[in-house]
Image (spheres, grey):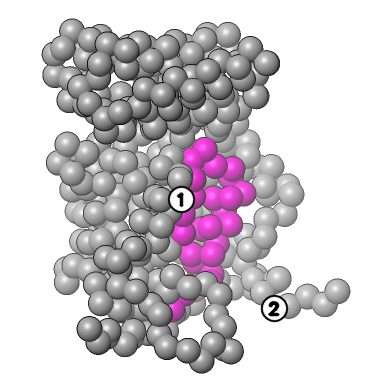
Amino acid sequence: MARKKPEFLPPQQDLRRKAVNFSKGFRLKLEPAELRRLEEVVEKAKDALSLDVADKLRQLREALEEVARSQQTDRGMRTIRALSLDIKGAGGMFNYPLLTEFAKSLNDFTKGINQPTPLQLDIIAAQIDALYVVMGQRIEGQGSKVEKDLLTALRLAVERHKTAG
Amino acid sequence: MSESMADHERIDFSKINFLIVEPNRVMGQMVRDVLMMLDAQYLDRARDYDSALTVLRLGRTDVMITEWALRDEKLGRTGMDIVHWIRNDPASPNRMMPVVMMTANSEEEYVCRARDCGVSEFVAKPYTVNAFYTRLVSAIARPRQFVRVDEYFGPDRRRRRSDEYAGPERRLPADSY
């Protein structure tokens, strides 16, 4: 089948003309002092982020209970996926990369699972517990060998028991 | 080492109208605070597809920063649907608007899907402020040419150009990715 030739449109310069200049504003590459000021903004948000994640962990437990009671499993699993994705994105932003790792593991595991088996439910619960431990023990950075081993074990369980249900 | 003109360029963020689409209140506030620190004055916020389109239809948005996963998942609407609307809907006020997607859907599969939907820049969460700033600058100060091929309309997905290639056209339609 003959493929249409691509049509090219030149870059739109309106925004560049409006905002880019040689006298006012921020350089395209930030000065170290400017970057520090921006990092302070994120630093200030860390408490709020941490509270937000704690609230999401509580919601995760509630959603899991709902699924375990076999009520609205679709809705419960959708909630678990959405919350774990949020935590995955937030953890590393306030120096909790392990939260990001465990949340990614939970999110990957639950993709495509709408009616989990009892064993799959146990694995989901273990991953939520791990998130609680990281937050509860305030394990910043990469954690110790214990947390790394736990993450490896959970990943193995995820690989072994991830079949869509 | 000699300095180029680009080394002296600056961006006046106070001239730019931003739309932040982020269902997470804290994350949205953080993006807003960073932009305000950059002296941005015009900031609209939306948390879902419908409220984002309401703002976009006003025609004042210069740059949209959007999350992929919106709370409309049940309705099947994500940040990608907003991007699709901007790029393809006849009612879109600026089909070539720079769009920065920030998302925890950071795996390669998602990056490719975002690119093939017409996203200008992709920021994986969790992100650093510097990474966010770099993508934002790229979207504003280094606009890319657009391409229309089959079903795809969006920024040229080829960032590197080779003038030496003389073979046949190998671009694939968007739905073949």
**What amino acid is at disc 1?**
Glu
Q: Chain of mark 1?
A: B
The residue at the point 27 percent across, 11 percent down is A118
B137 within the magenta span: yes
The spot of residue A68 in percent (x, y) is 23, 10
Q: From this view, report whether residue B57 is shown above or below residue A124.
A: below
Query: Per the image, is B81 magenta?
Result: no
Mark 1 secondary-structure assignment: helix
How many other residues sit within 10 Å of disc 1, few (<14), some (14-19) or many (≥20)?
Answer: few
Tell me the number on the disc at residue B5.
Answer: 2
Residue nearest the viewer, comparing B23 with B77: B77
Q: Is residue A84 visible?
A: no
Q: Looking at the picture, tell me which residue is in the foreground, A26 or A157.
A: A157
Residues at marks 2 and 1, CA–CA distance in whole angstroms: 34 Å
Q: Tell me where the magenta segment starts and ends, as one range.
A: B121-146
| A41 left or right, relative to A106 | right
Position of residue A86 measured from the top left corner of the image (x, y, whole percent): 39, 31
Residue B60 lies in what quarter of the image? bottom left
The residue beneath circle 1 is: B108
Q: Which residue is at 25% across, 87% downward? A: A2
- Mark found first going from the N terminus, 2 or 1: 2
Q: Is residue A96 above or below residue A7?
A: above
Residue type highlighted by circle 2: Met
- The quarter in which the N terminus of chain A is drawn is bottom left
